[in-house]
Image (spheres, coloured by chain):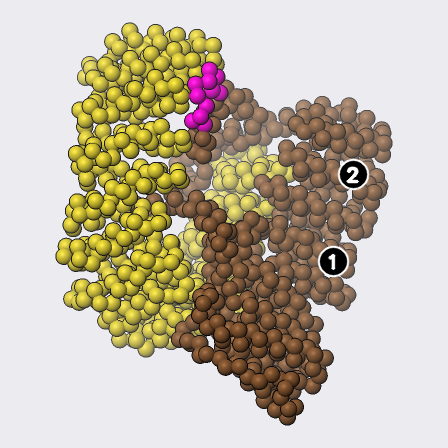
Amino acid sequence: MAGADGDDSLYPIAVLIDELRNEDVQLRLNSIKKLSTIALALGVERTRTELLPFLTDTIYDEDEVLLALAEQLGNFTMLVGGPEYVHCLLPPLESLATVEETVVRDKAVESLRKISQEHSPVDLEVHFEPLVKRLASGDWFTSRTSACGLFSVCYPRVSSTVKAEIRQHFRTLCSDDTPMVRRAAASKLGEFAKVLELEYVKSDIISLFTALASDEQDSVRLLAVEACVSIATLLPQEDLETLVMPTLRQAAEDKSWRVRYMVADKFSELQKAVGPEITKNDLVPAFQNLLKDCEAEVRAAAANKVKEFCENLPEDNREQIIMTHILPCVKELVSDTNQHVKSALASVIMGLSTILGKDNTIEHLLPLFLAQLKDECPEVRLNIISNLDCVNEVIGIRQLSQSLLPAIVELAEDAKWRVRLAIIEYMPLLAGQLGVEFFDEKLNTLCMAWLIDHVYAIREAATCNLMKLVEKFGAEWAQNTIVPKVLGMANDPNYLHRMTTLFCINALSKACGQEITTKQMLPVVLKMSNDQVANVRFNVAKSLQKIGPILDSNALQTEVKPVLEKLASDTDMDVKYFAQEAISGKLFCLFLSQSIKTF
Amino acid sequence: MSAISASEKVDGFTRKSMRKAQKQRKSQGSSQYRTHSVPVELSPLPQLKDAPSTEQQELFTQKLQQCCMLFDFLDSVTDLKSKEIKRATLNELVDYVSTNRGVLVESAYPEITNMISTNIFRILPPSENPDFDPEEDEPTLEAAWPHMQLVYEFLLRFLENPDFQPSIAKRHIDQKFVLQLLELFDSEDPRERDFLKTILHRIYGKFLGLRAFIRKQINNIFLRFIYETEHFNGVAELLEILGSIINGFALPLKVEHKQFLMKVLIPLHTAKGLALFHAQLAYCVVQFLEKDPTLTEPVIRGLLKFWPKTCSQKEVMFLGEIEEILDVIEPTQFKKIQEPLFKQISKCVTNPHFQVAERALYFWNNEYILSLIEENIDKILPIMFGSLYRISKEHWNPTIVALVYNVLKTLMEMNCTLFDELTSSYKADRQREKKKEQEREELWKNLEELKLSNKPLVQNNSHGLPSVQNNNNNNNSNNSENQDRSPAAVTANDQDPDVTVAASESTPCAK
């Protein structure tokens, strides 16, 4: 700490505290964010005796400042003198853990959890655990909710009497009067169960779990479902049936769709936690019901899990279960009335083919894929197309190509630009799977058409797509199919299309290599430096800077440099700016290309 | 993975288009979770008015039981006959409890509450529109409304019947009943919420034993709304009920009520959808202040704490509420909060959003506020002067500039000497501020150096802190000079994916 203490005179605490009190919130926030700097300037001693008391006393501020403070204090251990003194940080964090604003409180709890690890077991009992107790018995709900997150971090490291007290406090909070507190407790139930001894899991946690799972508020019940996963993992298999399953069954048929949704959403985790036997007997029918639920939200959540659920079924009779129990439900979902359900299904259904193998895929799944490829909702089609790789591995993509093409074409011309954007992004993947011939024949024109789309984002994506295609199919292919068309656009009457040429050149030059760039692209770029639209001209300057590294030094000197110099004296200030930037940047390129040659 | 990202990409707009589609087909939802009850066909019972008086009670019960049958209204073609019978019966029941005396015998209460509970208590369906914006979108209407409306009507008439006895009813209309009723306030259907509002108000009036419970549950709903879900459709309706409840509070106010004001009503101002219930909220706040003027200071400080930073629309609402409060403020209370309040107002008048500036400047049209300002001109003028003076030269909007001139003139007339002093010291003050700013930068620079020299020491625990770039934080004015040079603005047009500028053929100057 040698550097720190000599500077007291320079940084009287008053000045620093003045900064923390500044009228301007933004300045206060900046100061708080640099609290570690202040602490460093003060040294550990004064940080403990002056700064921390000040912070503890003045915790009435904008939530944003408090949030920053709560975060800072979690990293303060060294600044107060190491683990030995870490408990000094507890008072301000305790106040922060009681404020109303959730984000502040959560951050304070996070920091408390962090520094709890830095407490010695003795300090934990002397300083930390009393704080948890105070919070747990606070008047206003905020402190009690915060307490819920702190039990699990101190439980493992305290004596058995204190452990008993902690369990008691947790029990009390689980039946708190305020639903907010019960929710907080329910959300920490699984975490707390993990640090408890097995006997207490059975005696304490199960009863709390059962009570929370039948709470009057569905927002509490659904959190119990989350806890169910951790609890089931902790218990030995033979106890699951009696201790967990009654509650889980009840949750899967809860009258509130939110609870059923949660069950559907956590289904894979639940399945792993309860093991194959219970899965076969209990979860399969439950899953069928969720797939047929009356609320679309629940069906969609379940549909999302179809693949994972099937994957994790016990292998010995997986195929039979899928074919007789799951597939019939899946078939119905393909023509569901809700598009979210269909698109959730479409995002996973292809994955079933690897599980079911070639024959089943052709016989049972293929018709479903084809139906979804023709779905009225673009998202569904898109999800099918974006997962083609799964099917490709099993039956090859040719089986689908007949239906695929119309679907792609339709998406490519969709009225909504985001749909077009999404399909463009799958083009390189599709091209890889369909092969260059099919591509040239059917898809190439689409790719070129996107270049003159009226939305910039599409033109940009189309440019990027071309680059990826060239990377896949090679420079020669580029030279024959793409480059001429791209360069042709340089004479388009619309300046936006002319700029697209430049953007394409920027993207393609590297993949095409020096020869094509120098011989075919560069002349076009240089010619465009005379364009009457300034936007085109300064993009010429930018392009030259981009393709500079690919060109040889001769071309740079004799062709590029004069043009840039001409642009640097353009009448338009932006053109000038970019030309100058290119010139100064180009020196670097020159140096680089020469040095590559010399090595 | 890629599938998810793809759907996310399309998501933003699908919802919008979905919304449009919904509007066209007038969305309806219903939420009875039909597990296994397939409706049995109903057969009409004889009319109550035709039955001999000895059998009326029995028939009344039968009809109530008959109305416990639920039908699927999403399917508009099934059970048409039975639906019609139930509708007619409900109509008859409404009529029966509202026009006849002596029909509410004790044994009828459980049957009545059972029929009501079966029909209206249900888990509300998920919103069809995941980001339902109550200001913009059409609400999803309850499909079963033809029946449900009559059931609500019946409940209301039941509560309002002169023979209605709370002492008997409280066995059935209990905490659980009220809790379920409160959950229904989240319904998207405004017709339903309107009924609920009247009904809950009646229950609050008639069941003294439930009052504290109702207040506490409303508390919980609001707290969940503020801090957890940010979603609840019935906030405005609940606030409306509270408005009249607060009106009836006895003095001195209980701690519980003050806590409700400070810990629930004030934080409610932070909600995103404030516009939907601000009028009712402001009414509640003003009610409190009229009851107990000493609450003025904490309330105004609370509002200042939650003052909107980026949402101009909300800022205008806050200013409106402040004016409502100032309208009823006592001069002694005004003195307590004038400084922090006018610091905020002085920020508002310089707001580049002209509606915010305008709303703040309108305070000077209010006679009562003017008199308060005049009384405290020596405190307020120094706070306001700098902002007004600057904005009179700088604001882009001519209306604002004109308003500012008027305000300055009014203030000058209130204290001419002080005004002149401030005018002459204006420049010096700005200089002093600038100097202070420089000192601050200097201080932080020195601290940074110290930090650098100590770096090895704190390496472990300083990670996660934002790297400090001192020059970024304070001197916004210097930065903007550089930015002027950046030609980013030129291409901005084209980078916006929604802009369709393809049509602009080769215009010589596309900028």
Residue situated in front as seen by the camera: A599 or A466: A466
Q: In the rendered image, is residue A60 in sight?
A: no
Q: Quadrant of residue A550?
A: top left
The dot on residue B349 is none
Identity of the residue drawn at 85% across and 28% down: B417
Which color was chain A given? yellow
Say what amino acid the circle numbered 1 marks.
Answer: Gln
Where residue B266 appears, as percent x and y from the top left, is 64, 54
Chain of the residue displaying label 1: B
Would residue B68 be found to the left or right of residue A395 on screen?
Answer: right
Residue situated in front as seen by the camera: A556 or A261: A261
Where residue B489 appears, as percent x and y from the top left, is 49, 24
Q: Return the disc, 2 or 1, that comes first in the chain's sequence.
A: 1
Identity of the residue drawn at 25% across and 18% down: A517
Where residue A326 appears, as percent x and y from the top left, is 26, 64
Q: Specify the segment rendered in magenta.
A: B501-511
Residue situated in front as seen by the camera: A118 or A6: A118
Identify the secondary structure beneath mark 2: helix
In the figure, A341 relative to B506: above or below? below
The dot on residue B287 is 1
Q: Which residue is mark 2?
A: B364
